[in-house]
Amino acid sequence: MSLDAAPSLQAEALPPASDAEKQRFAALQQRLTGLTDRLSTNTTAARTVVIVPSLSFDPADLAIIRGVSYYEERLLSYLTLLQQPETHLIYLTSQPVAPAVVEYYRDQLPGRSTERRGRLTLLNCADGSPHPLTRKILDRPRLMRRIRTAISDAESAYLLTFNSTPLERSLAVRLDLPLYGCDPDLTWLGTKSGSRQVFREAGVSMPEGFESVGEPQDVARALASLKSSQPELRRAVVKQNEGFSGIGNAIFPYDDAPSGSALLPWIEAELPHRLRFEAPNETWEHYIEKLARTSGIVEAFTDTDGNGEIRSPSIQCHIDPHGAVQILSTHDQVMGGPAGQVFLGCSFPADAAYVQEIHVAGRRIAEVLRNRGVIGRFGVDFISVRHAEHWEHRAVEINLRMGGTTHPYLTLQALTGGSYDPTSGQHRTAAGESRSYVASDNLHNPAYIGLTPDDLMDIIGEQNLVVDPTSQQGIVFHLIGALSEHGKLGAVCIAGDRADADALLRRAVAAIETAAAG
């Protein structure tokens, strides 16, 4: 097909979110079962994967994240698919990815890097604006034609995205490709309100609270009800339905709250001044406007008064097009922000003391989602509190998308050739050895600003900050594009146990800081 060949006029004419577009999308999704059957029986079968790492969220929320445009590089971990000799990848970004970054990822894989170059097509929008990548692609007809041209066989191709929204549905229909992910009409199940409904149906514990709360008076009534039912409650959390990574969360402290009939009027008066936002530079006016527009939840904040331990484990699952549920991994998340609501990084695997309990809860939630028609990857976050010899777990959020734990585990799989063992809760290499890692998206230091990707490659070589192919342990960096402009970097540090992985992370940070100072 030539660059100027006409796209499918029928697909182009379908209005976004129309019944006709949804019907076409549903028809395309039917291809997935046959495609996955063929790949499961023949892992070397030819396929083309179009990867669109678009963070399709509210641009105002995205603007809060330092170096957010470079988060599109995190899914370069999917270059591991090039290990299959008949797999072709088409990878889209907003702006060009530095050649040194692409080579770095390709060189992580065993085999001949030169051969893999011919099976990777990199395309970009040349657009650094704070809008979702998928929107940028849809707005560029000639780029859409380039994508179609790069697909040799549409029947063996599919679209892989970070999350699924109506934008991704439109892109799938325009490209005439199935989307390996959740139908956008089902993504409500992954909102804060939808998550609570799924937890209830699955019989999984969650914090006491209220969903589908929008207007300020509804928030105030929910806050008053929580305090009345739990007089000892010190704080509550308000969450916008479509917030992510803690953005959209706000804390309401009950300090000096009256009781009885005076409580509700007091909360109504205090709410605009007392609500503490996790997102920097957030304002009451902007926050409550979005909450009223998208709705949200109010729930009890889990405190221990310093007498217990709180952790934030998560589980990552997969539902294939036939409805089979697979547990992919568990993590203990590293949280930050003013009230510990913002995701900073993670360690793998989750603590053995409770990993099987997380498995059970995660599988029950996955079964509910499967029965609703969900496919693809998703994660579930928990709040876990230690009571003497046992842990109490409460589910707090479903992420019907990829997340901050996706690319680290993909990296581990690629470099060890192993898989997750749900029986032990460990990752086993091809040789049967266990591996752990710590990962962070937030290695940030203003002193790093000015270090280019080529500089980082020099530091990696000089300090031997690599993965040893024999021991299958070491360090892999990501978010490399954000280093020079934002002084920000990510890393996955793989070792035999958590302590050694922590030591690798400290070594990496020390090496980069020394180089930056020199």
Image: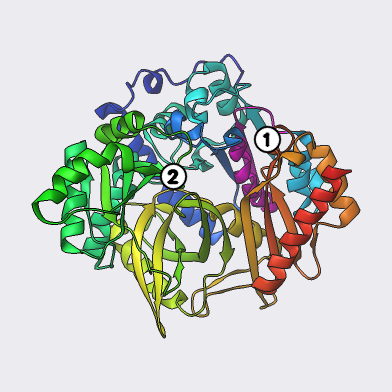
Q: Is mark 1 on a helix, strand or loop?
A: helix
* 248 or 438, nearer to the observer: 248
For the question of whether residue 413 can be seen, the reply is: no
Q: Which amino acid does label 2 sit on?
A: Glu
Which region of the structure is painted magenta?
70-97
Relative to 353, residue 73 above or below: above
- Tell whether position 104 is magenta: no
Describe the element under mark 2 as helix, strand or loop.
loop
Q: Is residue 88 magenta?
A: yes
Q: Name the residue under label 1.
A: 486
Residue depicted at 22% across the width and 62% down the height: 200
Report the side of 415 relative to 308 (left or right): right
Relative placement, left or right, of 10 versus 450 is left
Q: How crowded is mark 2: few (under 14 residues within 10 Å), some or many (20 or more)?
A: many
Residue where numbered disc 2 is placed: 278
On the image, the x and y values in percent for residue 233 come to: 27, 62
Circles 1, 2 touching at the beta carbon (< 8 Å): no
Task: Give the residue furthest to the bottom.
Answer: 389
Task: Report how many numbered discs are placed on residues in the image.
Answer: 2
On the rendered image, what quadrant is the N terminus found in? top right
Image quadrant of residue 44?
bottom right
Look at the image and tell me whether residue 205 can be seen: yes
- Percent across and percent down for residue 19 are 25, 29
